Image (cartoon, coloured by chain):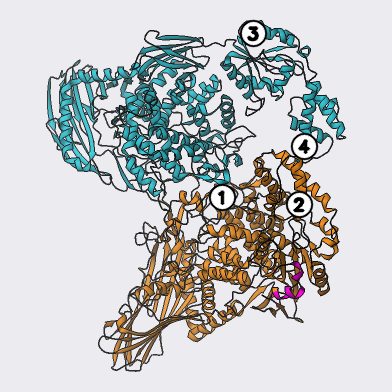
Chain colours: A orange, B cyan
Amino acid sequence: MIFKTKKFTDDAIIRNETLFTTANGYLGLRGDTEEKDAAYHKGTYINGFFDKEPIQYGEAAYGYAENHETILNLPDPKCIELAVNGIHFSTGKPDDIHDFSLAIDTTTGILTRSLFWNTPDGNRIELSAERIVSFMHPKCAFIKYTVKNAGPADVRIEIVSSIDMSAHNIMAREDPRVGAKFSSRPLIVDEDTAEGETLCFSAHTRNSGLSLAGTVQTAISDSGAADYTITAAKNCSGGITYTAGLEPGACFTLQKFITYSHDKTEAAQDLKNTVLSENRRFAELGEQKIKAEQVSFLSQFWDVADITIDGDKNNEEALKFNLFQLLQSVGKDGKSSIAAKGLTGEGYEGHFFWDTEAYICPVFTYTAPEIAENLLKYRYSILPKAKERAKIMNLKGVLYPWRTIDGEETSAYYPAGTAQYHIDADILFALNKVLCAEGKCRDSGTKNETGLTSSQIEEMAAETARMWVSLGFYNEHQGGKFCINDVTGPDEYTAIVNNNTFTNLMAAENLYISCRLAGSHADEKEKTEWKHAADMMYIPFDKKLGIYPQDDSFLDKEPWDFKNTPKENYPLLLHYHPLVIYRHRVLKQADTVLAQFLLPERFSRAEKIRNFDFYEPYTTGDSSLSHCIQSIMASETGDSEKALDYFNKTVRMDIDDVNGNVKDGIHTACMAGSWMAVIYGFAGFRDYNSHWSFNPQLPEKWERLSFSMKLEGTTIGFEFTHDKAVYTLRQSGKQDSILLIHRNKPFTLTPAEPQKIFTVQPQLRAVLFDLDGVITDTAEFHYKAWKILAEKNSLRFNREINKQLLGVSREDSLAIILRENNTAWDENRKTAACREKNELYLKSLDTLTPDDILPGIGKLLAELKAAGIKTGLASASKNAPKVLRQLKLENMFTAVADAAAVQMSKPEPDIFLAAAEQCGEWYSDCIGIEDAEAGITAISKAGMKSVGVCTRSQLNAATTRVKSTSEITLKLLRQTIAC
Amino acid sequence: MIFKTKKFTDDAIIRNETLFTTANGYLGLRGDTEEKDAAYHKGTYINGFFDKEPIQYGEAAYGYAENHETILNLPDPKCIELAVNGIHFSTGKPDDIHDFSLAIDTTTGILTRSLFWNTPDGNRIELSAERIVSFMHPKCAFIKYTVKNAGPADVRIEIVSSIDMSAHNIMAREDPRVGAKFSSRPLIVDEDTAEGETLCFSAHTRNSGLSLAGTVQTAISDSGAADYTITAAKNCSGGITYTAGLEPGACFTLQKFITYSHDKTEAAQDLKNTVLSENRRFAELGEQKIKAEQVSFLSQFWDVADITIDGDKNNEEALKFNLFQLLQSVGKDGKSSIAAKGLTGEGYEGHFFWDTEAYICPVFTYTAPEIAENLLKYRYSILPKAKERAKIMNLKGVLYPWRTIDGEETSAYYPAGTAQYHIDADILFALNKVLCAEGKCRDSGTKNETGLTSSQIEEMAAETARMWVSLGFYNEHQGGKFCINDVTGPDEYTAIVNNNTFTNLMAAENLYISCRLAGSHADEKEKTEWKHAADMMYIPFDKKLGIYPQDDSFLDKEPWDFKNTPKENYPLLLHYHPLVIYRHRVLKQADTVLAQFLLPERFSRAEKIRNFDFYEPYTTGDSSLSHCIQSIMASETGDSEKALDYFNKTVRMDIDDVNGNVKDGIHTACMAGSWMAVIYGFAGFRDYNSHWSFNPQLPEKWERLSFSMKLEGTTIGFEFTHDKAVYTLRQSGKQDSILLIHRNKPFTLTPAEPQKIFTVQPQLRAVLFDLDGVITDTAEFHYKAWKILAEKNSLRFNREINKQLLGVSREDSLAIILRENNTAWDENRKTAACREKNELYLKSLDTLTPDDILPGIGKLLAELKAAGIKTGLASASKNAPKVLRQLKLENMFTAVADAAAVQMSKPEPDIFLAAAEQCGEWYSDCIGIEDAEAGITAISKAGMKSVGVCTRSQLNAATTRVKSTSEITLKLLRQTIAC
């Protein structure tokens, strides 16, 4: 894919410099032009090369993070200045420039710029520049700069190739929201020379104890010049000056071979020599070899990572662009991670966050697992600092920093920093996922085949678990449950809360994983403690709403007044004091929804639907990490169009500069999120517990989605359309076979049988019946039971009042009767009355016989049985089994869902989903039959088609409506499922 | 009282400079010596004269406080340097100095220093210095400096009197915990001259827009010199030099008349002239007049404020010292308040906190009400800034700053700053108290006789109420109660919590007061809203513990591990990260206890005892505001010795430098707290709702406590001993009479009957009986009822099991029986069984007759009735009234406490306190009779003497023990009460 622009206005340049960055995860060169004029901010970064300074607090306290850390903008090695006949060339004079083009090719990894310059003295110059930051030689980059005289006259050109030693970070005084806070220049130059065609410097940081060396070799290639001169200045900034005479049609091409490297200051002496010799070797490779290697590296990457979206090429390109940027940004040496802005800018100071593990690791886990491993190796490398931090925080084990470069906590606002203890769990969760994806987590032991040794894995597992058990405690006030107080979850719009659901769930997960992975780094006693804490983990749950509140106090918060919040007041954190945001029910991102995505098997589908629906209205998406998860979970609820809306916002965040801050760098986590939205969302991938399942659900406009993934050493190809799902074993791993799951059906791919195809269109596989009003009518029995009870208690009761009781629970029915009689009973009397009514009702059910089956139902059931279509009962009545027995229908049902076991009754979808699951059929292959509004809503929420029996209500929302049960036939059901 | 020291080692000097400060609430001169040598930190302050600079945040956010504000250390006007025969005098050479004495007289307001200096050349010089900062002329101070030649030879002395223009604040680099953070010199000198004997300067602040002028006139008085010269230098720092020849025995005395004043910069031009003319007038008064005025001012103050504690002169002196310091520190001009450190040092940057209203206002409200008024006038003056702040915080009305000098919020840590919204209520509460104490709050309208006009009072009332209703909301999730989320209460060891009990209680109080005071500044509709919010205010309460949790999450916090906390780790905030402190159950100060002190009529005595006992173990007292409240509430629970322990820690905080930080200034709130501990604690004063009640309870070692107070314009004298309480009308106000309350007995003092005397020793006025085992024995009835129930349900039950049921509630008894039978019943069945058991028991009670009255009880009841001693029934049994009827004793009891109405059953004191209250008698005048351990504990907690009937238990804790009820006689009871 080629990402291209023809724009070079000032506005465009600001974005271009970020978006056309070339980088390899170690060295990053912003997409600024070689020439200085018109550049917005020229940037050169090494991943993990930073300086630090003490944080100034308005009011400091014990244990606060001590230092700022900031990635440094290094001396700029790209610099080339061109003059023709003494006239300085500048892209800042757009009227003189024609046919401008800037393009980066994601398959070759080459940035190309070309343009024509009409000089003020009437000449025309063709300029083309190529730039490569080598994936194979992480410390090296290559620039080719060609000047062609496009006529009409002879010209004399002058080219100065240099390293701009004056480059520095954007400072806070220039941009307080982004700028660095250094009080004095952080990089101190020790040596700075120009000799022959070689520029070379060495330097060290003021406070962080790092040294840096850089060299640039310039060389003429393909000179069509009549004559030329080469002059070296005294230092890098002076550079090498080339002058040449060019006849019309003649070219003059310069190559720059760049090598930058850093190390601890102690190793500074050797660094310069290493850099010089590495640079020599790189230059000796030559242009063609360098390009060929780059292409080869990328072809290997795209072989797995490539994604096709037929019907949405625009987003396909954006997605590929995002993947390419991630590959460019991510550290691959086990000593660095991936900064929030990659190597494209100075936003967030070059810090590493949980974004790495929660968003970016999954991408590489399934496309280039060795990269994911190295990200976790970096986390191992900072374990000692995380141990120190835990001690300061009065905790055992390790507490990873919320934001850092070298492992030290640098978050200057602890309520949204240190309080996010979940970082420990995020890391261990990602580690576990990498091991599982590589097929190593099914073993009880771990092997040292990953980037991490088994001992290192064990240590990380043990130390993170220790943190959690020392942070929480068994709270007698909560029935002895394990509680974790005063934390902040990923949704930073609430802070310092008790029992953040996300944190507690992930802590429990961390503890379970640790039990499995800690090996000899913990004894059995300790592991038993971890398991106990995990088993006893308190998870906030609200019975009335059937949802998991974000934390203990979430439902006590005042709902945010969205109506009276003007658009320009978003993101809220820039327009309201934290206290205002914290005390309201409003989210930056829905972390409970995120938890339900990450831990899918801990929640029923009904719960996920309900929680998503509950949180969505409060979710502002003020965090760029929000939309992708919303997209995934919208897919899970079956709403692919909503999922696409969210996806559109996330996939084009940087390309379209949605938030207007691309100038500070790309949003790496958001880019990774766009991949997740496709794979976990539209393809419905789930990877929990090494269960590789898929539930493809394409949005209407998408015709075909295809991609590959690495799973347990195999490479699998996926091709999903609206009709079918094709799974293909492209390359097998150590084990021959791979077990996958399509929806709820496991299947195996082997070299012998390398492909499986499934239909995606709904198939009629199960019919789920409501009881009352669909199979039989017990309304009269209920009426009589209430009547007896009412008379016994001298309460007024008649058919008019009875109408209010339809579809209403026993307890609520009694409440209505009492209200009608202006009577109040205490709890005990009410309980007793309900029990008595039920006994009366049950007794009356004894009179029920098969004659009471509603018209056509007996026949329908027989027809379904004959056709091999399953049948399920989805009734809210706890007496359903008895009714079935009386009707002698107990053997006609594959499954009878237990009304007492589901969380919420209709109109929530729980009972229908439970019935489908008991039938063993996928929800979209089921039809529900109902006679009440609430029931139809429940079926629809469950993602099923419905038949409405309109004896009592209109049921406009039903897929198919009938006036009597006698109209329901197998044929009708088949028509309905195909709607 | 004269506060005196003879120490002048470096250690002593550090404390002396703070403790011997002379100040008048406007101008403060630290107690440093006139000479520069050996001084620790020479300080000169004007209340409210400050500069500001932007706060540097590690990570800033919307609405954060913008500026630091810091009181400025001004040019030092005290400077005098002495040389004798060319030898420079210095207190830094202690070997040469003898008979050193430094003393401040709280009745004259004069600081006196005297010493003898043995000069290295064999002479002896007597030096004495006096210093006055005039209460009558707030901008002026006076110094008298006398040098006497004590022989043996003639000497030539040189004295330089100057203003040290180089004086500046302690900077953060010198002491980060105290120092100011100015990046450049905050005070810019505009003019600086010396002419004749007059020094004069003018200056302005860099950022705060204030200007300052100062002048010093030096004059020779009483010269016994043989000859002398006077030379003026060019500027204030150069000063005026006097040389004189002194024969042995001759004196040379210099006087310095000092005037300092400040204003807004706009008014700078006039300032210098005003200062010069005011200085001239002051100097013309002359030494004697200045001293006489000072004595007269103080005598007026002490006339009301004086306190005598016979038996504890040490603490009496400390208390007087504290009152004197408060008088010196407090702003009296309505434009300034009282800084946390007064005018004695730079700690807390000279800021005003809630300390002013919550701790210091009460002292002046009852001793010098015009001062309290002026403190509130200051709050009115900053109303516009508080309005702005509310707007920034998305609130209506006003939000007062947590810490400030000029009204701008300057707290750089909002969780313990802005989140303390209670400041609004503290201010309005103090305002209301001043109005009440002046007798103005019984009227529905308000008059403009206070420092504030009625319109100003109305505005403050309305605007604070508006803040509260916009901050909180009616929370459906809490039954529609009015909740206030994400606040911090005074106990800063928890922060950003929901429904801090203190805050909610005080918010409700604020709203109620506002309804009364807002006058025409709010319409009836708005007032109705306020009242509704107050009525619906949610107050956290835990039924199981019977206590008010500090906030919604308090009982969910993990108890702090006090056992494993080393002493040196206190105060905790200096040794643990805020997150560690916040997530634990640990307090800096018990704010719920404080609320129960401030709002005494909202809580029963039992509740206060229980809450105090609950919170005390978690209360570290890390705040200097803690001990005094603990002392007051220890008095309330009847534990005068514990109250004395706390009092000792609070009253001598500064004199003994308990926290080792007196060098930074006194603790004004703690000093005020020591007064509160005496008046509200040992004297038991309560002033809620204009009810002036007293309940004196002296600690054993105190023989007599006497003091005066101003109440509704009258001056009342109080004299309390262990035997009696004497109330004397010393001076009547506008109304002739004043209504006071001794314990629970109201009485009136009038000019005609100006004194009332009450006995304090316990008098036998009521006897409170337990029922079962004291009046009759229903144990057998219970046994039989359980037996029948058990048999009916086929449960094993016998006398052995029955033993476990003694004193156990019905529900718990059933639980024991079921446990013994390894049986589980559901809630409904258990409820039904308990009801059935009770019905059986009640039926069996029908067989009870007067014959079942236990021996001697009938006679005793008759005896008590005859003697006019009241009788109360304090039984936990809800069937008590029926039992009394059966025994035909229903007319023998003055009061039958309702077991269902009390919060907690025995061993909590509720039922005995309820019975005493129903009898209308003070708890210490009651005796309880009990046969169970829990009952004796309850009586003892209630503060009563007890008689234990030891038929079942030992009852070692009872005051008197009998083996049978027949032994209890009136005589025995009289002996018991006198124990």
Which amino acid, mark 2?
Answer: His
At mark 2, the secondary structure is helix
A973 within the magenta span: yes
**In the image shown, does A47 or A60 lie closer to the viewer?**
A60
Task: Assess disc 3: are there few (<14), some (14-19) or many (≥20) residues with their C-alpha within 10 Å of its C-alpha.
Answer: some
Picture quadrant where residue B40 is located: top left
Question: To which residue does mark 3 refer?
Answer: B865
Q: Find the magenta span and give its range.
A: A962-975
What chain does badge 4 belong to?
Answer: B
Which amino acid, mark 3?
Answer: Lys
Question: To which residue does mark 2 refer?
Answer: A782
User: x, y (%) of residue A941?
Assistant: 65, 64
For residue B187, above or below residue B118? below
User: x, y (%) of residue A200?
Assistant: 40, 73
For residue B24, above or below residue A448? above
A187 within the magenta span: no
Question: How much space separates mark 3 and mark 2, taking CA atoms?
Answer: 64 Å
Question: To which residue does mark 1 refer?
Answer: A554
At mark 4, the secondary structure is helix
What chain does badge 3 belong to?
Answer: B
What chain does badge 1 belong to?
Answer: A
Which amino acid, mark 4?
Answer: Lys
Quadrant where the N terminus of chain B is found in the figure? top left
Q: Nearer the viewer, mark 1 or mark 4?
A: 4
